[in-house]
Image: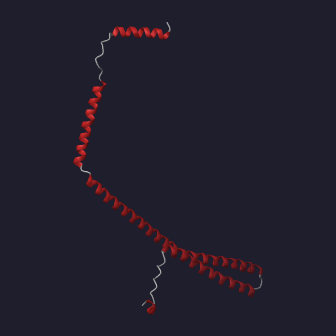
Amino acid sequence: MNRFFGKVKPKAPPPSLTDCIGVVNSRAESIDRKISRLDSELVKYKDQIKKVREDPAKNMVKQKALQVLKQKQMYEQQRDNLVLQSFNMEQANYTIQSLKDTKTVVDAMKLEVKKMKKTYKQVKIDQSEDLQGQLEDMMEDANEIQGSLSRSYDTPELDEDDLEAELYKLKFIDVGI
């Protein structure tokens, strides 16, 4: 059936805002080139007006210069309008991009909230308190064990006077007296 009636061509996607900005900027650049060309013409006419002494010839050059000046002003106005359009589109593009970024952040936050809820369901407060209590008890038991292991065994009683006398001897031996 497609052969008899033809196939509908898919529509081209509408131009993006970035594409439109590029087109408008290129038009503004084109107008800038025209303005610079008109500026060079105005310089030529200015030089001619300085050189020409006759009134009719001078008036004719002035008329041409005025016409070029009008064109230049018209182009400048068009360029200014294009620059404003480009600026407005860039602002809109920035706003759109900011909204897309915001949506991405919100989507990521929603996903993280779901993950947190799922994880929170797996953790029970009563269990965590029980575990904490068990850990405290185990730490107390470990401290008691460490305390019992660090106690000294029955060692023979040593006389303090004997120990001091031995220390006194060591001091003299080390000093060499």
Choose between 114 and 98: the one closer to the eye: 114
Q: Picture coordinates of residue 84 (x, y %)?
A: 52, 74
Choose between 108 and 60: the one closer to the eye: 108
In the figure, 91 relative to 161: above or below? below
Direction from residue 46 to residue 16 in the image, left or right: left
In the figure, 106 relative to 3: above or below? above
The quadrant where residue 99 appears: bottom left
Choose between 23 and 3: the one closer to the eye: 3
Which residue appears at 67% of the width and 78% of the height? 37
Which residue appears at 24% of the width and 49% of the height? 125
Q: Picture coordinates of residue 19 (x, y %)?
A: 51, 75
Which residue appears at 38% of the width and 10% of the height? 164
The quadrant where residue 111 appears: bottom left
Direction from residue 80 to residue 172 in the image, left or right: left
Which residue appears at 46% of the width and 8% of the height? 172
Q: Picture coordinates of residue 102 (x, y %)?
A: 40, 64
The quadrant where residue 35 appears: bottom right
Choose between 30 and 141: the one closer to the eye: 141
Residue lying furthest bottom in this view? 4
Residue lying furthest top in this view? 177
